[in-house]
Image (cartoon, rainbow, N blue to C red):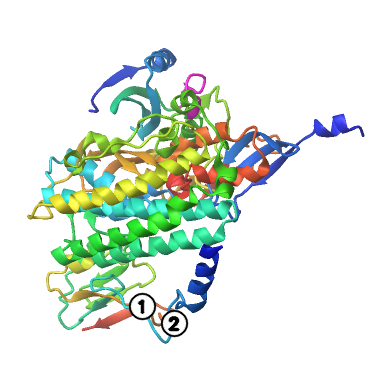
């Protein structure tokens, strides 16, 4: 009986177990893999990231110079980030926000 | 080459498997590879964390006797051999007829390499099964 | 129609593939006589993805990512088994620090898997509150995995040659704090529940198998351990397990309650292994250089939360593998499930099926 009453009081007066999203969002730890980002000005279009990608999400062509990324195919493994010789790819922590329905092109040069 | 491997043939297979059972080995699994015009089949057994293997070379087109009479646990993996490699296994305790993993319309024997080499020409497709449960002869569908 | 004739009629009830109790689609065709199951026939193939074929088309370092994604619940151990196999083929020695980090992540993954299973088992006999509480404990494990490796379930850290990411000293302290918190949570949520009357009514004496049946039908993992068979592949000392002190857990009864007991005790054992590994972890490199391509064939076995997984890898000197064959523990536990079901009521089928911890996406690849 006593444990029942203490349980009731605890449940009545303690904070809810859930976060009031969207007013308070969960902070992702640093180093979490969320989505891929590229600094297109540093890219030399060598194509190493496209060769390393396990799911063939990146397409690189030298002529004309373009770097295309299919966000839906990406498995967010960051293998390309390690492989890039110019370190222009980076993995950002958050993966919220709208994804455009067509393939994203990070730009050409 | 795997360690502790004994070569067997289709005739000596059941005898060797029965010996392993008598020696209190546990059945682990069956591995199959496509070697061109034959299939290389390994039977793995384990006792006290030591793995022993039986290696069988089966010419394509020959049938394989099932070991479910000795190790009942082999029924699932031998049905998988039928599906994925197109090997015909006889005397199975439960026979799914090639429909354990693959649905109708799936490519036949997908893990065979020689089939993949003909990609671009023809692809054999599993037909709908007849009401008795037997699989109807396949038709070749142009890719 | 006389009652005699009616009670002799059998009906076939399909359990699954869509069922609230099952985490993944599996169909069991139950031949029933009134309320008792007489025979069961499995039908799988709903999530067959052809991953063994896909593995032949990726190069051998990309296959580590593919192996991770064979299953979401036992994902790190798949990547580890694959990496260990290729490292043996190519004679690569993994640095000690990488081995200890692999053990830490493996045991964290085992915690998450057993907690997930515990919640599903509670859900299978209607105890939804315990389901939610168990998964709430599991969130702490997922958060620490995300903080140390970057992903909540697909850690993406194990690769051929070692691990890709290091855990700093602060990270290891954080892991220890989470272990202490989890120890308290387990005492409150998990252990007390094992003495509950209702839980015992639903699990004691249900789905009993004998030790002989478990051996003959090739049961692995907690299903075999609950029948008294001491089968835990970690004692062979792969990765850093050779330097850690532990004993495989066994129970004798062979019913659902015994299988639950084994997994609950394995939760505590995993916490202990993580603490031991953090205490002994040496400094050093985390990755060995990988040169060349794998040639030859090898068989590797690793202890997953559900039992022993066996990987057969054959390389032919090119960067693509010749053959990758995976036999996961649930694949080996399906025959024993068919032996567990006859004689029990339809209401127990959900509990029995969940007590083998079915991971059907592993089974079908």
- In-front residue for pair C297/C130: C130
Q: Residue furthest right?
A: C1
Pinpoint the chain carrying mark 2: A
| Residue labelled with disc 2 | A21
* Horizontal and vertical percent position of residue C39: 64, 33
Q: Horizontal placement of B63 versus B23: left or right?
A: right
Look at 61% across and 53% down and name the residue there: C19
Look at 44% across and 42% down and name the residue there: C261
- Helix, strand or loop for the magenta stretch, by majority: loop
Tag 1–tag 2 contact (CB < 8 Å): yes
Res B105 label: none
Residue A24 in the image: above or below residue C32: below
Q: Horizontal placement of C277 versus B23: left or right?
A: left
| Residue labelled with disc 1 | A26
For numbered disc 2, what is the local secondary structure?
loop
* Horizontal and vertical percent position of residue A42: 15, 80
* Range covered by the magenta-colored residues: B61-73
The local crowd at label 2, few if under 14, some if 14 to 19, many if 20 or more residues have their Cα within 10 Å, is few
Look at 9% across and 52% down and name the residue there: C282
Earlier-in-chain disc, 1 versus 2: 2
The local crowd at label 1, few if under 14, some if 14 to 19, many if 20 or more residues have their Cα within 10 Å, is few
């Amino acid at each position: 009986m006593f444990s029942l009453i203490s349980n009731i009081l605890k449940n009545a007066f303690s904070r809810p177990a859930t976060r009031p999203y969207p007013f308070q969002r969960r902070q992702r730890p640093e180093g979490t893999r969320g989505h891929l980002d590229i600094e297109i000005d540093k890219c030399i279009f060598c194509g190493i990231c496209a060769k390393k990608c396990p799911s063939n999400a990146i397409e690189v062509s030298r002529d004309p110079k373009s770097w295309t990324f299919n966000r839906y195919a990406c498995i967010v493994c960051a293998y390309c980030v390690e492989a890039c010789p110019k370190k222009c790819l980076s993995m950002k922590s958050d993966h919220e926000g709208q994804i455009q329905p067509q393939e994203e092109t990070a730009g050409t040069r | 080459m795997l360690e502790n491997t004994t070569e067997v043939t289709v005739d000596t297979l059941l005898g060797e498997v029965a010996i392993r059972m008598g020696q209190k080995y546990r059945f682990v699994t069956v591995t199959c590879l496509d070697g061109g015009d034959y299939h290389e089949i390994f039977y793995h057994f384990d006792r006290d964390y030591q793995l022993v293997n039986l290696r069988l070379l089966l010419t394509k087109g020959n049938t394989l006797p099932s070991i479910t009479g000795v190790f009942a646990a082999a029924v699932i993996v031998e049905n998988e051999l039928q599906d994925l490699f197109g090997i015909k296994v006889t005397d199975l305790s439960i026979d799914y007829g090639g429909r354990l993993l693959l649905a109708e319309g799936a490519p036949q024997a997908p893990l065979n390499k020689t089939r993949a080499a003909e990609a671009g020409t023809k692809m054999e497709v599993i037909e709908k099964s007849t009401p008795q449960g037997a699989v109807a002869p396949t038709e070749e569908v142009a890719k | 129609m006389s009652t005699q004739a009616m009670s002799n009629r059998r009906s076939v009830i399909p359990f699954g593939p869509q069922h609230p109790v099952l985490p993944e689609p599996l169909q069991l065709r139950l031949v029933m006589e009134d309320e008792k199951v007489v025979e069961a026939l499995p039908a799988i193939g709903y999530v067959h993805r052809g991953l063994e074929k896909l593995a032949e088309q990726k190069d051998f370092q990309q296959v580590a990512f593919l192996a991770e994604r064979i299953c979401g619940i036992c994902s790190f151990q798949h990547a580890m088994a694959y990496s260990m196999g290729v490292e043996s083929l190519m004679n690569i020695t993994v640095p000690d620090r990488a081995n200890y980090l692999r053990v830490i992540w493996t045991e964290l993954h085992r915690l998450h898997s057993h907690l997930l299973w515990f919640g599903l088992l509670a859900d299978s006999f209607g105890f939804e509150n315990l389901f939610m509480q168990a998964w709430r404990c599991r969130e702490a494990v997922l958060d620490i995995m995300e903080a140390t490796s970057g992903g909540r379930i697909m850690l993406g850290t194990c690769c051929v040659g070692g691990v890709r990411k290091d855990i700093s000293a602060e990270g290891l302290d954080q892991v220890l704090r989470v272990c202490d918190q989890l120890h308290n949570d387990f005492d409150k949520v998990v252990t007390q529940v094992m003495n509950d009357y209702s839980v015992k009514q639903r699990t004691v004496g249900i789905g009993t198998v004998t030790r002989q049946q478990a051996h003959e039908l090739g049961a692995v993992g907690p299903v075999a351990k609950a029948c008294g068979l001491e089968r835990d592949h970690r004692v062979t000392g792969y990765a850093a397990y050779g330097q850690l002190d532990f004993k495989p857990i066994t129970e004798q009864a062979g019913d659902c309650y015994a299988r639950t007991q084994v997994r609950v005790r394995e939760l505590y054992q995993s916490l202990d292994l993580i603490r031991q590994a953090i205490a002994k972890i040496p400094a050093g490199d985390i990755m060995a250089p990988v040169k060349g391509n794998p040639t030859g064939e090898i068989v590797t076995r690793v202890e997953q939360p559900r039992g022993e997984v066996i990987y057969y890898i054959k390389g032919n000197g090119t960067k693509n593998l010749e053959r990758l064959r995976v036999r996961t523990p649930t694949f080996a536990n399906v025959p024993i499930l068919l032996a567990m079901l006859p004689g029990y009521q339809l209401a127990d089928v959900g509990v029995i099926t969940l007590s083998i911890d079915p991971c059907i996406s592993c089974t079908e690849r």
